[in-house]
Amino acid sequence: MSSANRPTPRRIEPSFARSIITTIVLVMVAVMIVRDILVRRWGGERGPQSDVTQRSR
């Protein structure tokens, strides 16, 4: 089989729209994570809850 008969592999380039959508999704996830951290840190009116449960008598 000669090399002239073999098909040349095509290079698949990512589309511009796909890279924009990926960037937007990553930014949205990062914003939601930061928002969640800030709400947990400064959103509560009372102090942090203890993980220890109290037994009823």
Image: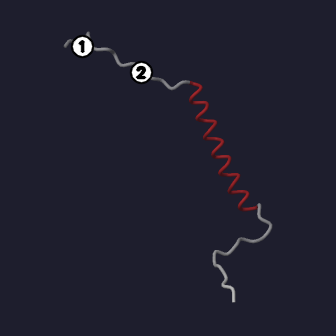
Q: Quadrant of the C terminus?
A: bottom right
Question: Which residue corresponds to mark 2?
Answer: 11
Where residue 4 appears, x then y in whole percent? 26, 10
Residue 47 appears left or right of 20:
right
**Which amino acid type corresponds to the residue marked 2 in the rendered image?**
Arg
Picture residue at 57% right of the left edge, 25% below the top:
16
Q: Residue furthest right?
A: 45
Where residue 6 appears, x then y in whole percent? 27, 14
Work out whether 38 lies above or below 17. below
* Sequence order check, earlier mark of 2 and 1: 1
Picture residue at 77% right of the left edge, 61% below the top:
43
**What's the CA distance linking mark 2 and mark 1?**
18 Å
Q: Residue furthest left?
A: 1
Work out whether 5 lies above or below 23. above
Q: Residues within 10 Å of mark 1 (few under 14, many from 20)?
A: few
Question: Which residue corresponds to mark 1?
Answer: 3
Disc number for residue 25: none
Number of marks present in the image shown? 2
Q: Residue furthest front?
A: 57
Work out whether 17 lies above or below 41. above
Tell me where residue 38 sits by quadrant.
Answer: bottom right
Picture residue at 61% right of the left edge, 30% below the top:
20
Circle 2 SS class: loop
Asked whether 55 or 49 is in front, the reply is 55
Picture residue at 58% right of the left edge, 35% below the top:
22
**Which amino acid type corresponds to the residue marked 1 in the rendered image?**
Ser
Tell me if label 2 and label 1 are in contact, CB under 8 Å: no
Where residue 1 appears, x then y in whole percent? 19, 13
Q: Residues within 10 Å of mark 2 (few under 14, many from 20)?
A: few
Residue 19 appears left or right of 3:
right
